[in-house]
Amino acid sequence: MGVIFTNHAINRLYNRGIAQSDAWDTFKHPEGILEGSTLGSKKFYKNYGDQKIEVVAKQNEKEEWVVLSCW
């Protein structure tokens, strides 16, 4: 299953010092999933020690997951 990271999401990862592999792992193996604030989006989250990573993603018209933002 592939995931598309937007430029915005990649910039947020870089600015926050989060590895893209950790964002991918959070999306693929979350501790929980909540509804996102954008219609149709989901917020995937996972704790890594004292750091919590959240990934906001939404499926596009081709049913591919698109990561919109991360923190």
Image (tube, rainbow, N blue to C red):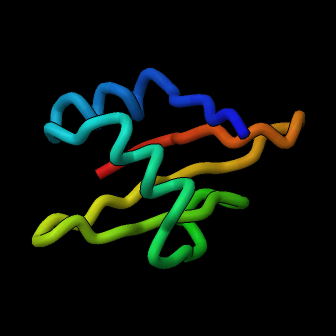
Q: Which residue is pictured at 28% across the width and 71% down the height?
A: 47
Q: Which residue is pictured at 63% across the width and 38% down the height?
A: 66
Q: Quadrant of the N terminus?
A: top right
Q: Which residue is pictured at 68% across the width and 33% down the height?
A: 2
Q: Which quarter of the picture shows residue 55?
A: bottom left
Q: Count of labels shown? A: 0
Q: Is residue 25 above or below residue 18?
A: below
Rendered location of residue 25, percent (x, y): 44, 51
The furthest residue to the left: 50
Answer left or right for 17 relative to 3: left
Answer left or right for 26 relative to 33: left
In this rendered view, identify the residue nearer to me: 38 or 22: 22
The furthest residue to the right: 62
In this rendered view, identify the residue nearer to me: 65 or 28: 28
Answer left or right for 9 relative to 35: left
Q: Which residue is pictured at 41% across the width and 67% down the height?
A: 45
The furthest residue to the top: 7
Rendered location of residue 58, percent (x, y): 67, 49
Answer left or right for 10 relative to 51: right
Q: Which quarter of the picture shows residue 64?
A: top right
